[in-house]
Each structure stands twice: as C-alpha cells, then as structure tokens.
Amino acid sequence: MSGEGAGDVSAAGRASAGHTDSSALGGVGVLGLFSEPTQRLKGGWIALFAIAWLGIWMAQLTPVQLLLPLQVANRVDTGNWIDTVVAFGVISGVSGVAALLTFPLTGAMSDRTTSRFGRRRPWIAGGTLLFAVSLALLGLQTSLIGVGVFWTLAIIGFCILTAALTATISDQVPVGQRGYVSGWLSAPQAMGIILGLVLVTVLFTTLLAGYLFVAVALVILVAPFCIWMPDAVLPKTERARVTARAFIDGFWISPRQYPDFGFTLLSRILVNIGNALGTALLLYFLLYGLNDADAENDLIVLVLIYMVFVIIASLGAGLLSDRLGRRKVFVLVSSVLQAVAALLLAFVPALPVAMVGGALLGLGYGCFLSVDQALATQVLPDPATRGKDLGIMNIATAVPQAIAPLLGAGVVALFGGFAALFVLSGLFAIGGAVAVARVKSVR
C-alpha cells in the first residue's frame, strides 16, 4: 500500500497484472505475484518488520526460557529434578509435532488465499490472535495437561503467524537485501528474549502476569506491520486448481530433484537442534548442573551476553553477506562457532566459561540466523509456492526448539548430567556445517 490501510490492497492486486505499486513504507515494486522483487525496500517496511519480530520472539522465547520451565516445575512435586526436565521436554515435544504439521499447511494455504486483504495478512492477523489468547489462558492452567494443551495452541498460533510473515521476504525483498532484512528477523530474537526476561522478572511477580504481558506486547508490536504492509491480492482466476491429492503431494520436495533445497533444509535442522540443545535447558543447567543459588538472575546475565553477540553478528553478517554476494561461508563459520561454545560447556562446566560460551553461541547463531534465512529464499523450487516451501523450511527452526527439550531431557536422564547434552549439541552444529557445504547453486 502507499501508506494507507488495508483498503489499498486492490492496488497491489492490479500490480500483479503488470503495474507497479510504490509503497511509502518500503517503496516495494510488485511487478507480479510470482516474479522476483527488484525494488529496494525503504526503512519504514524494515522497521515495522523488525518490530513485529520483536513481539513474536518475546512471546515465544520468554515462556520457553523462563515462564514455562517454572510453571512445569511448580506442577511436578516428585522431588526429583530429572522428572521436571522430562515433563518440560514432553510438553515441548507435543507442541513440536503440532508445529511440524502447521508450518507447511498454513504456508501453502496462504499461497492460495484470495482475500481482498492480501495473501499473507489474514494469516498474520489470525495467527497473532490465536498465539496471544493461548498465552493468556496458559497462565491460568494448574495441571500439566492444561499447560500442554495451551502451550501447543500457542505454538500453532506462532507457526501460522511466522509462516506467513517469513513468506513476505520472498514476496517483497530483493535478493540483494535479503541478508540485511533477515538480520532484522534474527536480531529481535535476542532483543525480545532479554527484554521479556527482564520485564517479567522485574515488573511482574506471578506467572499469569508474565504471560499476559507477553501476549499483549505481541499484539501491539505485530499489528502495525500487519495493517500497513503492502500485500498483493491473488485474483481468484489466477489461483491454480489442484486436487486434494496434488495439494498433499506438494509437501514432498524431492531432495534428488532439488538437492540444494534438501541440503539447506538439513543444515537448518541440524544447526537449530544443536542450538536448542545448548539453550533450551539452560535454566535447569544453572540450577542442577552448577548448583547456582542465583540461577534466575544469572540466566538473565547469560542471555544478555548472548543477545549482544546475536545482534552484532546477525546485522553485521547479513549486511556483509549481501555486499560480498556469498552465503555458505557465513553459515559454515557460524556452525563451527556454535560447536565450540557447546563443547566448552560440556568439558568446563563453570559460570565464567558459560559466559564465554554464551558469547560464542550468540556470535555463531546470529550469523546463522540472518544469512541462512537469505540462503533459504534462494533455493526455493517454485515462486508460486513460496509460502508453502518456506513453511517447510520454518519447520527446521521451530520444531527443533520444541523437540530439543525432550531429546535433551532424555540425554540428561540417561547420563545423569549435562555434559553429554552439550557434546550432542556440538555434534549437531558440526553436522549442519557439513550439510550446507553441499549446496551448489548459492555461493
């Protein structure tokens, strides 16, 4: 749109027929729904995009790092800390199964949406509301089953929202800006988690208040982008007709036919599992691995260190990647840095070493987040199915975060400690580096 509200989306629809839509938000030129965007985005679009992701990460990661583990610990009264870790892992694993189905399905449905408000906007709005309401109700739960149900609904809302939101990168961001813009997807992850942790621990004394805060912040921060972004309308006459069988078959992308997509997806799965194994049980590591009497405050310090380096790496690496026209080397370096951080935590379990590990992990993961997202948009098989294909790619981000606590809990329970957990984290990160090295079509 040209600075207007949703009423101008019809202009974007006309643009898909060959006209150009110039937006005051970003100067987005929409030369066709399925053509590669060429007009550079301006600061307004990028700023609203970053603010939306700040709200999303605050709402997703504050519960993962603090609220949900504490809520689960309050409900498990066996006296065995491993039971608490396992219960948290099971709840996260169930939500991971939901994410596995939701991401590609909603991405595909947004590709085919013919709403007068655009293809992506209805899904961004609907996902935000489901996410926020589920978080608010999650704070009221007094049983582990209730916690599991509403956390799973929250993750479904998260998946609906982010599947549509990441598709806007391929829809509207030219290739030469994708590293930089993707940096504004990843930098808010670090900002969101530390902001959420600090505000929840300083301003609110109950879990319910913490959940309500992140739910309200989510709606307030996503709404501006949802309302004012340009979003081309798909005319009903241009929506391809497919059978139910063909629709389902579309979720299989052959790694033989599209090997670069396959290796990028594999790399993303491995690196994200490695990162999630290194961070998802961090509070429990401080509490039970280091016997830290001030674990909650030290968690904030570690996350702050992690945040600073994620921001530096995600914005710096994304911009440098665009200028050099190279992606793979950045992903390789990021994977190695994360592996080194994990191995430090495994073999030197001490708080000062954990701080060094947090810095390395942030540097590696920040670089990975921004550049890998740009890489992913360049290996998509079909421009007509960007939402669905990026939805499949997004599985490799959200599902590892959900299943890693369950996998990690199993490792901790099996070995009776955290060293094996961090070794496994490092091995996954190295595996991600090997996989991305096999990509051929992107430098």
Image (cartoon, rainbow, N blue to C red):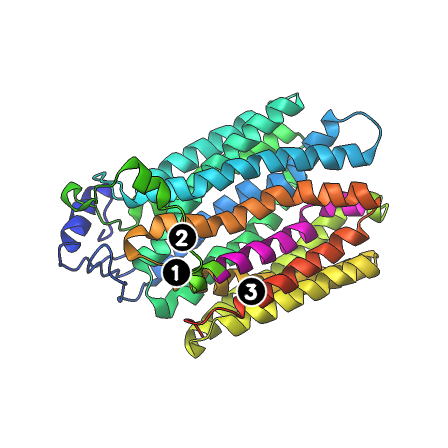
Which amino acid is tagged 3?
Answer: Ala
Question: Does 310 sit left or right of 374 as displayed?
Answer: right
- Where 211 falls versus 366 (above or below)? above
Question: Callout 2: 10 Å neighbours few (<14), some, many (20+)?
Answer: some
SS state under label 2: loop
SS state under label 3: helix
SS state under label 1: loop
Residue 100: percent from the left, percent from the top? 50, 41
Which amino acid is tagged 1?
Answer: Gln
State yes or no: discs 2 and 1 in contact (Cβ < 8 Å): yes
Question: Callout 1: 10 Å neighbours few (<14), some, many (20+)?
Answer: few
Quadrant in the picture for the C terminus: bottom left
- The numbered mark, 3 or 1, whose residue comes first in the sequence reads 1
Residue 112: percent from the left, percent from the top? 27, 42
Which amino acid is tagged 2?
Answer: Ile
- The magenta region covers 263-287
Residue 248 position by quadrant? top left
Magenta region, main secondary structure: helix
According to the picture, the residue beneath numbered tag 1 turns out to be 257
Residue drawn at the location 13% of the way across and 58% of the way down? 19
State yes or no: discs 2 and 3 in contact (Cβ < 8 Å): no
